[in-house]
Image (cartoon, rainbow, N blue to C red):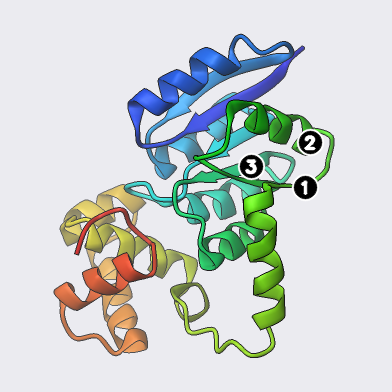
Amino acid sequence: MGIKILIVDDHGMLRESLNFMLSREPGMEVIGEAGDGRSALELVEKLRPDVVIMDIEMPKLNGIEATRQILHKLPGTKIIASSAYSDRRNVGEMLKAGASGYVPKQCGFDELVSAIREVTSNRIYLSSRISGLVVEGYIHKQTDNDSSAYSILTAREREVLQLIAEGKSTKEIATSLYISVKTIEWHRSQIMKKLKIKSIAGLVKYAVSEGLTCAHA
């Protein structure tokens, strides 16, 4: 049986292209596609892929949060991050979330195939463009004051913040996360308190600056 792959990216043409090419790669089978992190969670539980190719900047639930939740439920899943923006923060957070590989979207198809084969052999794969950022992150680890959203806010608060930044109403967020409107209002107040931000506009700008959402400030 071939390596079962799930492609997660909010760009439909990219998903279709990867599906077309990977399906023709010996020993590989694309079993599904998702356009956002929340859909990815549902498909991973349903389809049980061996490898998930995970974009980072996506609506509803970004790739970092989706990776955390997938690996919490199905720790044996291998996740390869694929992003057009490979800054030290995103690389570090994806690896902390449990990703087994990180490949920039600018890389060649052959490198992605190599990454898939490496992670399914229980090895970590980092593109040469990424490894330097990992070393840089290690060097700065002792001196950086980590005040990012990933250290200040809980996972649930980050989910709520992303949906707020994407313009969803309190009721829509509650429905999406299967919790009450009052609970969403409480999370929102906690987020504002922790971040010392007093307006929705301020929350949107913060979420965009922290890479929690692909929405534009």
Asked whether disc 1 touches disc 2, contact meaning CB atoms under 8 Å apart, the reply is yes
Residue flagged by tag 1: what amino acid is it?
A: Ile
| Left or right of 211, for residue 165 | left
Residue flagged by tag 2: what amino acid is it?
A: Glu
Q: Alpha carbon of mark 1 to alpha carbon of mark 2: how far?
A: 7 Å
The percent coordinates of residue 187 (x first, y second) are 32, 73
Circle nearer the N terminus (3, 1): 3
User: Dot 2, crowdedness within 10 Å: few (<14), some or many (≥20)?
Assistant: some
Residue in front for this viewpoint, 33 or 45? 33
User: Dot 1, crowdedness within 10 Å: few (<14), some or many (≥20)?
Assistant: some
User: Dot 3, crowdedness within 10 Å: few (<14), some or many (≥20)?
Assistant: many
For mark 2, what is the residue? 118
Residue in front for this viewpoint, 32 or 93? 93
| Left or right of 143, for residue 21 | left
Is label 2 in a helix, a strand or a loop?
helix
Residue flagged by tag 3: what amino acid is it?
A: Ile
For mark 3, what is the residue? 79
Q: Residue at x 48, y 84 (%)?
A: 147
- Closer mark to the observer between disc 3 and disc 1: 1
Quadrant assignment for the N terminus: top right
Is label 3 in a helix, a strand or a loop?
strand
Circle nearer the N terminus (1, 2): 2
Quadrant assignment for the C terminus: bottom left
| Left or right of 85, for residue 136 | right
The percent coordinates of residue 123 (x first, y second) are 82, 43
The percent coordinates of residue 56 (x first, y second) are 46, 49
Asked if residue 62 is positioned above or below residue 87 in the image, the reply reads: above
For mark 1, what is the residue? 124
Q: Quadrant of residue 114?
A: top right
The percent coordinates of residue 166 (x first, y second) are 22, 56
Q: Residue at x 46, y 25 (%)?
A: 33
